[in-house]
Structure formats: structure tokens, C-alpha cells
Image (spheres, grey):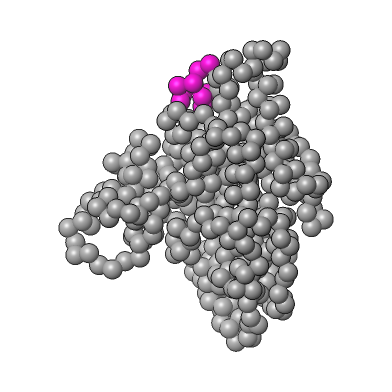
């Protein structure tokens, strides 16, 4: 689920005394840090008796649940998402995502020794400016909506892509870098979509000396170098796999491309890339340079490499999953443990104007967590009065055990209740 700007659905502590300004620290490159509601509310809190609250370690700092999950219309972060912050699966050397990250590092270290600076612990709470404005995402782009992105407050989001760090790192003077991190998107539910996933961003800046002797213009030079680099990476990771380049659109690159890989009978989009928009470089003080950039989805690649059939598996603590992977072992094929039977529940309702599938999925996930495997629209019609009915089929299935009828009925009952009360639809 790379942000598919292409088809217009956007489509990713050590020091307690620093806690006073943790969010401000996360947002240090944004212009809003001191005015952020989150930071202001923190200032109030410091006089209160320190109550035990869940703290999460982000970018080397501790942040409390109350700063992230708030009963406020400008906040749409549920507890199920808060619980994923700070998990940092990509920093675990024995986890498929960590193994993959390290294998990509190896490729860059071998081909560009000591060139690329690596970041894998940048705070996932970023300003709207960093996440969208700085990478030229248009003001009316759908990816900015509350339906697609998790907002901490009106000026602060959980990054929806690692591109959120491009501008800040360029401004700091980095010219070759890789940023790996967890990214957050409200989305539908199926075997390849999960509201938290991991991306790696790569950026390489060229100076006139690089392209002047090549006989080609700067943009073609960068585009060619980019494709060569990523094809080499794909070969390093996969050996042989069917892949194809697709011309596409991203607000931050021109030209822009997507790389797709053939997996489970389908073409799977695994990365987006292109030649960085000149404006981004200019604003970072690099007028005379060109750069390429890419953003790849680690889960997508890991599913193909390790034969992992369901994206929820990345989050399981089940030893039958975790014990199959070890540090440095790329591409060991996952042996599925017995699949427990799914249970399907259908639910029909008249939708309201404000109904969205992402909101439905969030309600279902909020109740059933990782027991929900898929939420699928199976029927859709509009009657003569102009009322539209949707029928969704929810597949419940645990990867760890058999679910009882009783517990599924209980879940489904709660889902029906909350769908009706929170989504303003009328059950049929
Ligand atoms: N940020 C894009 C996404 O999440 C991926 C991407 C595309 C990153 C092109 C880039 C890029 O750096 O140049 O889908």
C-alpha cells in the first residue's frame, strides 16, 4: 500500500528530563512546535501529580498516551494504533522486517561504501508540514483527509510515509540517506493491508560534476542511476523475480515510477520513486543539484521474499512464526502452521453521506483487533428513494487458535452496535 498518489487514493528514551518537550522534539523541524496543542497540554500537565500512564519510547524520547490519543475532534488516533507506536519491528534483527532492512543496508554498503547515512529511529509523530507541505502534497490532496491519515491534532500526524523526513534531512546537509520507519494509514482490511506498516526511504543527491561529463541532462542522469540502483537492489534481494516499471505520478518527483513484482498471481506494487522535484531541493538550499528518491514498502517485499501470506503475521508473537527467522537469513521460506477455519459474518446497512469504508474498518479493528482477516463489500445498491445499502462480509480468523462461535457472535454483536452508533448508518 504505497501511497498511491497515482490513482488519487494516497494511495509508511533515554532522558526523562527531556519529556517536558517530547512532542516539540519530534516536531523540531516544523514551524508549529511551540504552538502545538499537544505541547501546550503537556505544559499544563507538568504541574500535576505524575500518574502512571502508558509511555511509549519514540525517537529516543518518552511520550505518554494522553499526548497521542485524545478525545478531541482534531484527533483520530485510536488505542489500537497507539499500541503499535514504539514497537519498531524494523529494528529487530531476527524479525523478517529487520532482516530485510539489514539486507538492503548490505546492498548499499557494498555498492556505495560509507556513502549512505542510515536512520531507523526518527520519531513517527511529525508535523503536517513535514508530512505533506515539504514534499509538495497539494492542499486538497485526499491523503491529507482525516479519512486517510491519523491526526494527533490539526497540525500533527502520525507520518503516513517516510518521505516526511526528506526535507529535514536535506536541510541538515545529508546528501545520501536511507530512512526506515513505521508509517500509519487508515485503510481497508485484507491480507496485504494493515494500518501500520514499514517503509524505507532512499535519497541520493548529485552535483553538476556528476552529470556534466556524462553527456546527458541532469534529470535523465538521475533517473537512469535510480533505475540501475533499484534493479540492482531487486536482484540482490530476489535473484530472479518477474518485475516491471510503471510510469506514475507523485507530487514529490518528476518523472515518477513504480516497481511491481509478481506475487500470488498478482502484480504487487513494492516501491515508488523518481527524480526529486527541484522545488524540494531549492527549499533545502540545494539549488544546483538533482536528486533521486524512492520509498519502498518493507512488508510487501518481505511477504514475497519469505512467503508470508498474511500481513498480520508480522505482528504476532507466536513462536511458531518468530522462531522461523534468524538474523542475516534472508528469504527463508515461511512454513505456515495449520490454518484455523475462518468464520464469515455479513452485515447490511443503509449508509449515510459521511460513511467511509476506512471508518468501518477502524471500528471493526477496534473491536476484533487482529482476529479480523478481511472486510469486503459484497453487495451495494441504491433504491428508488436514493438510499444506498452496503453489505459487508467480515472474515474472522485467528492465526493462533480456533475461535468459538460464542466469541465471534460476541464480537459481531459489538461491531453491529458500534457501527450503528459511531458511523450513523441504519442496520437492515
Ligand atoms: N512516499 C511514497 C508512498 O508512500 C513512496 C515514494 C514515492 C517515496 C516516490 C519517494 C518517491 O521518495 O520518490 O507511497
Q: Position of residue 237 (x, y in %)?
A: 71, 47
Query: Is any atom of residue 47 visible in this view?
Result: yes
Q: In this rendering, is residue 311 above or below 7?
A: below
Q: Residue at x 53, y 76 (%)?
A: 414
Q: Residue at x 33, y 54 (%)?
A: 14
Q: Is residue 95 left or right of residue 39?
A: right
Query: Is any atom of residue 375 visible in this view?
Result: no
**Residue closer to the observer: 370 or 220:** 220
**Residue 286 is inside the magenta segment:** yes
**Residue closer to the observer: 270 or 344:** 270
Q: Quadrant of residue 399?
A: bottom right
Q: Position of residue 38 (x, y in %)?
A: 32, 50
Q: In this rendering, is residue 243 above or below 133?
A: below
Please give the range of residues in magenta. 279-288
Q: Position of residue 44 (x, y in %)?
A: 21, 54
Q: Residue at x 71, y 74 (%)?
A: 337
Q: Is residue 166 left or right of residue 341?
A: left
Q: In this rendering, is residue 365 above or below 135?
A: below
Q: Is residue 302 left or right of residue 64?
A: right
**Residue closer to the observer: 11 or 183:** 183
Q: Position of residue 33 (x, y in %)?
A: 32, 41
Q: Quadrant of the C terminus?
A: bottom right
**Residue 149 is inside the magenta segment:** no
Amino acid at each position: 500500500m504505497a501511497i498511491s498518489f497515482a490513482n488519487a487514493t494516497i494511495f509508511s528514551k533515554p532522558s526523562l528530563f527531556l519529556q517536558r518537550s517530547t512532542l516539540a522534539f519530534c516536531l523540531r523541524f516544523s514551524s508549529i512546535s511551540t504552538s502545538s496543542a499537544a505541547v501546550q497540554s503537556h505544559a499544563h500537565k507538568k504541574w500535576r501529580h505524575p500518574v502512571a500512564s502508558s509511555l511509549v519510547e519514540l525517537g529516543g524520547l518518552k511520550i505518554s498516551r494522553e499526548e497521542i490519543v485524545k478525545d478531541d475532534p482534531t484527533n483520530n488516533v485510536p488505542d489500537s494504533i497507539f499500541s503499535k507506536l514504539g514497537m519498531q519491528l524494523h529494528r529487530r534483527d531476527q524479525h523478517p522486517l529487520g532482516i530485510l532492512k539489514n539486507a538492503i543496508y548490505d546492498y548499499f554498503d557494498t555498492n556505495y561504501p560509507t556513502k549512505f547515512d542510515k536512520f531507523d529511529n526518527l520519531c513517527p509523530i511529525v508535523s503536517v508540514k513535514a508530512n505533506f507541505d515539504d514534499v509538495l502534497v497539494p492542499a486538497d490532496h485526499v491523503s491529507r483527509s482525516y479519512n486517510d491519515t491519523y491526526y494527533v491534532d490539526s497540525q500533527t500526524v502520525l507520518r503516513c510515509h517516510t518521505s516526511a523526513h526528506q526535507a529535514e534531512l536535506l536541510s541538515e546537509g545529508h546528501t545520501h540517506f536511507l530512512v526506515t520507519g513505521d508509517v500509519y494509514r487508515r485503510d481497508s482490511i485484507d491480507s496485504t493491508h494493515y494500518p501500520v506498516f514499514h517503509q524505507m526511504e532512499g535519497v541520493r543527491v548529485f552535483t553538476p560534476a556528476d552529470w556534466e561529463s556524462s553527456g546527458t541532462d541532469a534529470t535523465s542522469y538521475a533517473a537512469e542511476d535510480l533505475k540501475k540502483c533499484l534493479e540492482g537492489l531487486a536482484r540482490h534481494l530476489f535473484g530472479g523475480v518477474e518485475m516491471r516499471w510503471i510510469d506514475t505520478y507523485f507530487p514529490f518527483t518528476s518523472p515518477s515510477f513504480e516497481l511491481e513484482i509478481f506475487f500470488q498471481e498478482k502484480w504487487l506494487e513494492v516501491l515508488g520513486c523518481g527524480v526529486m522535484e527541484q522545488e524540494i531541493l531549492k527549499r533545502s538550499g540545494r539549488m544546483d543539484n538533482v536528486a533521486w528518491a524512492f520509498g519502498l514498502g518493507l512488508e510487501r517485499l518481505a511477504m514475497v521474499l519469505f512467503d508470508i501470506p498474511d500481513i498480520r503475521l508480522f505482528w504476532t508473537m507466536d513462536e511458531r512464526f518468530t522462531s522461523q527467522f534468524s538474523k542475516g537469513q534472508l528469504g527463508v521460506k515461511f512454513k505456515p502452521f495449520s490454518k484455523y477455519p475462518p468464520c464469515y459474518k455479513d452485515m447490511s446497512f443503509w449508509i449515510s453521506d459521511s460513511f467511509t469504508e476506512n471508518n468501518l474498518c477502524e471500528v471493526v479493528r477496534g473491536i476484533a483487533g487482529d482476529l479480523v482477516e478481511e472486510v469486503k463489500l459484497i453487495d451495494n445498491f441504491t433504491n428508488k428513494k436514493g438510499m444506498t445499502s452496503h453489505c459487508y462480509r467480515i472474515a474472522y480468523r485467528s492465526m493462533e487458535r480456533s475461535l468459538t462461535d460464542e466469541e465471534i457472535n460476541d464480537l459481531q454483536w459489538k461491531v453491529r452496535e458500534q457501527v450503528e452508533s459511531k458511523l450513523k448508518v441504519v442496520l437492515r
